Amino acid sequence: MKTSAWIRRLKESMRYLLHLGRRNPLFILGMVVVLGLVFCAIFAPLITPYPNDAKFGINFAEKLQSPSARHLFGSDALGRDIFTRVIFGARMSLQIGITVISIALVIGIPLGLIAGFAGGKIDELIMRVADVFLAFPSILLPLAIAAALGASIVNAMIAIAVSWFPWYVRIIRAQVLSVKEELYVESARSIGVSNFRIIIRHILPNSLSPVIIQASMDMGYTILAAASLSFIGVGAKPPTVEWGLMITSARAYYMDYWWTVIFPGLAIFITVLAFNLVGDGLRDILDPKMRD
Amino acid sequence: MKKYLLKRLAFIVFVLLGVSIITFVISHVIPGSPEAMWVGSKPTQEQLDAAIKELGLDRPLPIQYLNYVKNLAMGDLGVSLRTRRKVSEELNRRWAATFELVSVSMLIALILGLPIGVLSATHKDKPLDHTSRLFSISGVAMPVFWLGMTLQLFLHGGLKILPLQGRIDSQVLIDHPINRITGFYLLDSLLTSNWPALASSLMHMIMPAMTMSFACLAIVTRMSRSSMLEVLKEDYIETSMAYGVSRVSVLYKYALKNALIPTVTVVGLNYGLMLGGSFMIESIFDWPGLGRFAVLSIQTNDFPAIMGVTILFALTYVILNLVIDLIYFLIDPRIQRPGEGT
């Protein structure tokens, strides 16, 4: 009895996936790429030909080889296999995305809830401070913070998270403002439910969909921002294997050896694109009104 | 209206103070010693002590900050530790290069983005629409530095039709010096009929401007597509169609005009994106502007310079957004003037 119910459930969700795929093939494409990325990150040592090249493997005999069967994406100035390093780079990218988004959510969600729920002076204070953070054009603030903290990938992640959390404050606050007027909140209050419980049980769950959409897109943008910081020289440092750093390291000679920058850059591009497609698709599913 | 403006201006002052505090704190925790940089190589202890006094680093941080703000209010941004020139002078020498690049890129993004967006809307869910949507998602997903390097590989390395980097050929600049009027090479050489300089700076402009405009082109396209779709649903469009007004004139005379309004607001957003992109793009193309200056300053812990650039960028960004908000309700009479009514 139980197994048959499970099978029916499974069948239903498969049908739903199929339906989604037909309506939004780009979402499925994005999901496939993201899952592929996760696969690469987990199994990197098993699926790459020269796992040692992701650590200290220096092999001058193999340096700057063009792409071939031996080196699918060619090799860099230290003779390291670029294909191997691109696959290992997936690990760093996922770490960056997950860490930054988690920090931004942990700071942003409570502040947004408080600002939206409390209103008045507290709201004013939180939002004006958020506005100051948002007044910096794009990469400028993470750049300044990362420079101050000193170049390392961890510092770059902190810098990006600190600069981006105000966006989540703003999104959550806007949601809370509309959700808290709903009848079910009113009725919860009327039967004497505590504020804390109202926020956690009623307001938060109903405010989350735009956050989920934004977070899935930001996974990609975070990776992009971290790569940009590495490129400027305030992000990842060797021996970290990070796509942006791979491109910077090739700056002295890329005009003669195109593969040293093209493949790591493609990896960034495809990853960010995939997270974007996933976010776009999630918007379709979670928030049908927002379509187009 | 007056009240609204005052409120916005007060907000700008508040933001600037916030920005200056943040950047001040940031630049004072930067590891490394500014006094050592000020003195130069192999300093003696006396020299270092003198430098600390000279730079005011012996005073407590709040006092240092107050001094900084006092000078800032008078337009004095301090002295660059790296070049030993006034930061305001350094910024003044470089801003034209950056703003010329940004303006040209913005122009490209608008000129190409609007028609693509309109076509995409009128061909909704057709192959043309899908292509342009994929293209606009790509625009924001692509690392700008990588796009720039790829263009260099292709147009300079492969096809050999464009110069690798720089703002103008230095030999051309020696033979045909540009009279500085606006500081924009393209404009100045055009105004003074300096054709060789115009040709050279135009050739140097193509790749950086393409790189910079790509992401913004994506945003403009997406925005004009969605606002065009919105407008096309309106009754007056259908009415005009029913009256037999030609399709082209309905689209371009009635619909586009109204669809333009939301698109204008994204220009402000784009501007921020471009300033951010200038750090990387100017570094790759060796463009002598603010972005490259900022990167050099960051790499050498030159904190007065870092603060100067940051404040200048944030200031232009908030002011531009204010101007756009004002334009927004000047061009659309339906929007209630802020401060009047609710």
Image (cartoon, coloured by chain):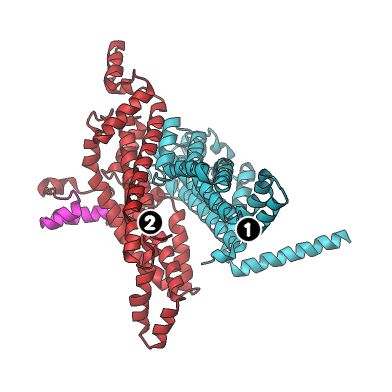
Chain colours: A cyan, B red
Which residue is painted at 38% across and 88% down in the image? Answer: B243
Q: In the drawing, does residue B309 fall left or right of residue A68?
A: left
> Is disc 2 surrounded by few (<14), some (14 to 19) or many (20+) residues within 10 Å?
few
Q: Which residue extends farthest right?
A: A1
Question: Do the residues marked 2 and 1 share a common chain?
Answer: no
**Coordinates of residue A223 in the picture (x, y in percent):** 50, 46
Q: Nearer the viewer, residue B302 or A205?
A: A205
**Coordinates of residue B52 in the picture (x, y in percent):** 31, 18
Q: Secondary structure at mark 1?
A: loop
Q: Secondary structure at mark 2?
A: loop
Q: Nearer the viewer, residue B268 or B167?
A: B268
**Coordinates of residue B229 in the picture (x, y in percent):** 45, 72
Q: Nearer the viewer, residue B86 or B159?
A: B86
According to the picture, the residue beneath numbered tag 1 turns out to be: A182
Q: Is residue B191 magenta?
A: yes
A242, above or below B250, in the image: above
Q: How far apart are the two marked residues, 2 and 1, measured between alpha carbons?
A: 28 Å
Specify the quadrant that holds the N terminus of chain B.
bottom left
Q: Nearer the viewer, residue A139 or A131?
A: A131
Name the main secondary structure of what is drawn in magenta.
Answer: helix
The reply to whether the C-beta atoms of the residues labelled 2 and 1 are less than 8 Å apart is: no
Which residue is painted at 85% across and 59% down in the image? Answer: A3
The three-letter code of the residue at mark 2 reads: Gly
> Is disc 1 surrounded by few (<14), some (14 to 19) or many (20+) residues within 10 Å?
few
Q: Which residues are magenta?
A: B182-207
The three-letter code of the residue at mark 1 reads: Glu
Report if residue B109 is visible in the image: no
- Chain under label 1? A
Residue B339, label in figure: 2
